Amino acid sequence: MLKVENLHKSYQVGKNTYEVLKGVSLNVEQGEFVAVMGPSGSGKTTLLNCISCYIPADSGSIRLGGTELARLGEDELAEVRNRKLGFVFQDFLLLDGLTVEQNILLPAIIGGSVSADVENRASQLCEVFGIAAIKGKYPAEISGGEKQRTAVARALINNPLVILADEPTGNLDSKSSRAVIGTFEQAKSGLGSTIFMVTHDSFAASFCDRVIILRDGVVWRTLEKRDAERTAFQDALLASISEMGRQ
């Protein structure tokens, strides 16, 4: 589904070159819920920005559903972002002047493809995520958890290959964080969605199938949940992060 191979990215600041990604390779399979963790400066955000096509990598390969993104022009990349990628952000980024339903339909509106089928899908997503009763309300009239469920529904409206989530629980308390992760779990189990999430939150990451830990621009370790209990998996994540800090 998503395959990253030997990805490099550096930034030029004055006369200095700072290499942020130093040969990152990873795979995300269809229907997986995968998180990326790591300390500040490890390359998490840069990796997500490269995958989302917002910044170009210096070298390496990013393949999405068999398509090599580096070979695409700007118009084709815009099409990939609108049709094949769904985005969930830390601050929701809902438009205040649109209703919940209109916010969900926004990617389809931008793509010029608001058909009856798309409107039906929006209604179905509202039902799945328990926001059908508020779809006529505006963002200022709904709770933070409802805003995030709306954001996830919006990310799914075009039936993307992968949802990219950037610190989706970063501004939320533990109860709201659990509600957001529950929404991702619903998307995965009920809709077969593939989710790739950048997070610093071990609680959120403990619900994932796998967690990739970055350190200094490389993959330091990958942990698989398999049949482990969520709390045991979170303990393993915390132990790995602690170990990395001691090295």
Image (cartoon, grey):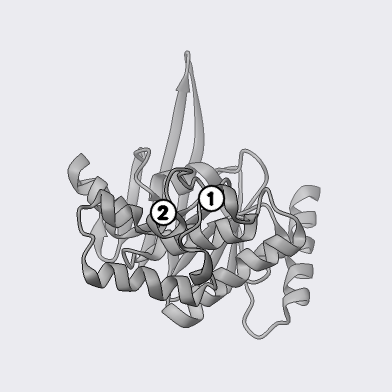
Kind of element beneath mark 1: helix
Please report the residue visible at 68 percent of the width from the left and 48 percent of the height from the top: 171
**Residue 4's quadrant in the figure?**
bottom left
Mark 2 belongs to which amino acid? Asn
Q: Residues within 10 Å of mark 2 (few under 14, many from 20)?
A: many
Residue 180 lies, with reference to residue 95, above or below; the image says: below
- Name the residue type under label 1: Pro
Element under label 2? helix
Residue 63 in percent (x, y) is at: 31, 59
Q: Can residue 223 be seen in this view?
A: no
Q: Which residue is drawn at 45% across and 22% down?
A: 12
Give the quarter of the image for residue 75: top left
Which residue is situated farthest in the bottom direction here? 227
Residue shown at 47% from the left, 76% from the top = 127
From what the image shows, is residue 160 above or below residue 57?
below
Q: Name the residue under label 2.
A: 103
- Around disc 1, counting alpha carbons within 10 Å, would you say few (fewer than 14), some (14 to 19), or many (20 or more)? many
Nearest the viewer among 162 and 7 is 162
Q: Do the residues labelled 1 and 2 touch (CB within 8 Å)?
A: yes
Q: Report how far apart the C-alphas of labels 1 and 2 lie in the structure.
A: 9 Å
Residue under pointer 1: 139
- Which quadrant, please, contains the N terminus? bottom left
Q: Is residue 85 visible to us here?
A: yes
N-terminal of the pair, mark 1 or mark 2, is 2
Which x, y percent locates residue 164? Answer: 46, 56
